[in-house]
Amino acid sequence: MKKISLLSSLLLILLTSNIYAIDIFVSKTGNDENKGGKNDPFLTIDRARIAVKDLIKKGLNENVQVYIMEGTYVLNKTIVFGLDDSPKGNYTVTYQAYQNSKVVISSGQAVGKWVKAKNVPGMQEVANGNIWVADMPENIVTFRTLFDGDKRLTRAKSDEFTMPVNKKVKRADSQNTFYNKDRIHLRRVPFSNNEIRDWNNLSDVEVVFNPVPWNLNLIQLESVDEKNKIGYLAFEANAMPFTNKKYSVAWIENVIDYLDEPGEWCVNTKTRKIYYWPKNGTPSNNIQAPKLMELFRVEGKIQYDLPNDIPARNINFKGLTFTKGDRSIWYKNRKGWGIQHDWDTFDYGNALLRFRGAENCKVTECRFTNSGGSAMRLDLHAQNIEIKNNYIDYVGHMGILLAGYGPGTKDVNKNNIIENNILHHVGQVIWHGHAIFAWQSGLNKIANNYIHDVPRKAIGLCGVRCQILMKPEDNFDEASRTIRWSEIEQTVDSTLTPQRRYAPYLHARNNIVEYNRAERTLLKLNDGSSINISGAGTGNIIRHNLIYDVPHVGFRTDDWQEGTTLINNIVHKSGSSAFIHKGINTIKNNIIIDCNRGFHFRAYPQQYFVPESDITNNIVYSSSANFVPNSIFKWGRMFVHVAGTKPIPYEYNMDYNSYWWPGAEKDLENKRKNGIEANGVVMDPNFKDLSKQDYTIKNKKLLKAINFEPFDTKLSRFGITKEYPAKFKALDKTLN
């Protein structure tokens, strides 16, 4: 009797509970009035989210799989997975493609009913008869990106023009403090001819300029003084090219006056018209404008002014394709800020998938492609997020961004895994976008990623440079606005180096960056390096990475960087330096091949403490007689060690390195005269086959002479592993 009662009770529980508690289905042929089963699926992903929330409310004690059937799911609003969508305990909810079907998440809105444009003010003669016009989609207010199928179209742009240089005004950034109180200089765009006019839709028009070699500005116009030939930006730029003729070039985008080539487009949101010059004569039936910057967001409760946030948890995404999001626009008085020169990186929704206050989530086997903004962001509070086996290509800004809170005691962006991903052609609109960027984020593992063909950095670890923290009064810098000044101890030990003074507040620390492969980076901007550590915390380890065929720098420690170890890396074919070194760090057991320069030492005027660095046991090889083994960059004045008088590089522990190029013997002799490289040698490593990137060292005597510890140099050891999805590998032409 008891057995029967027990069985009855179990059956009653099953019957009265939601029978789809484990598996929920979404289909393009479904209906949101359905129950969500395989045979009666929901129509929308958001309806499935609500069903999961209901299960959680009732006391979910199982993992849930939300299976999404094949098709394109167009969103009109961002789907937000919040605290109520987070299962309790260790249970998970996974939103995934059903049986490897192609599931596309998009915000692209169809643009149709194209007609030939006639008598449009400003249209050039060459464009007459070639321009088509259509109405903006009704549910879109504005957009900055347009797609034809799977390709982002090019916005109409003017020819480049040179802005007159004002030598009386210094560049405004954290290195060159803006000394003029009249900050209108940071809004003025002088022009010589008629490049800028008082168009009727100025809010649509952007000025694009490259003020310094590490960023690209895209800023709206607010007004134009045609008589005095001055355009005024909608807000102050963080840098303007007043003193450097090389970087005083600008151009205008999104005006019909400059729609003069096939493939270009522009939009006038005042008249709500889109203009397009199709390459094939007529517009396709697949022109789309994005409605959203964010498609999915996982968001807990962010508490800026409190020590603790309440994160959403245990929400996973697998096998989905995210596409056709818009990029952000910079505007006055918005809540988020830029980070140094890397605009739109702090707490701003400009990514296809965003985690903002989240823990224990996974993104696996997803693709992020053809979007105006970033692919993924991990904002503010983000812990134990795993991003693995994904494919990211042709996005406008960042590939993967981890951005914690600004310097202070709140350290909650950490312990994430970015592993086994392919990223290429990121930063297509905003050139300074990194493939992978960890800002104020620590204890992360960034491993086995393959990154290629990007305009700036492959991987960056960054915080806020010490000179900003030393000057609370200079708050014009974008990064300074993120600093939690109330948490910063103002009484500091002046005997400490600036980096050590502020180390507790610099959270980009103890990261492991290993087994990554980066090729053809820094294609648009030349400041920085393929893998860059700048103003970050201590304890970062950069090991077993391959940098190949880059026009500029391989590795760089910058901005008072301290406590970084760069070991067992390979730099092959760098058009500049293999390593640029600032601060106190270790460069050990690396292989440098056919770079323009081996080591490049730099220092700021305040940096007297470089001598603690170790540069040992490295192999430096070049087939060129023009090779520069190392150089000294004296910034401001002659530098001396605080306790002595010797110039900087000769206070390094630089020894037991191997050199080989025409003239290496003379260089080693000069080094010894200056008290370094007592045990350095001139020996040919005798690499097995550099043409095939076979870095096997056949000269065993060299290894013993400099105490070089052999490591696995096989090309297959760097970048993606064997478990990487074949369907994504097949997409990358560089692998096939």
Image (cartoon, rainbow, N blue to C red):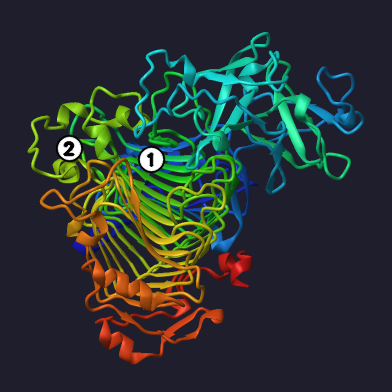
Q: Quadrant location of residue 269? A: top right
Q: Callout 2, which amino acid?
A: Thr
Q: Secondary structure at mark 2?
A: loop
The residues bearing labels 2 and 1 have C-alpha atoms spaced at a distance of 34 Å
**Crowding near the residue tagged with mark 2, few <14, some 14–19, many ≥20 C-alpha atoms within 10 Å:** some
**Where does the C terminus fall, quadrant-wise?**
bottom right
Q: Amino acid at mark 1?
A: Lys
User: Which image quarter is the N terminus in?
Assistant: bottom left
| Location of residue 50 in the rendering, given as x and y in whole percent from the top left corner | 44, 38
x%, y% of residue 314?
A: 33, 50
Q: Residue at x 60, y 38 (%)?
A: 107
Q: Nearer the viewer, mark 2 or mark 1?
A: 2
Residue 398 in the image: state x and y as whole percent.
Answer: 48, 45
Q: Is residue 101 above or below residue 343?
A: below
Kind of element beneath mark 1: helix
What residue would you read off at disc 2? 409
Image position of 690 with respect to 466: above or below: below
In the rendering, which numbered label is found on residue 53?
1
Residue drawn at x 76%, y 25% as measured from the top left: 256
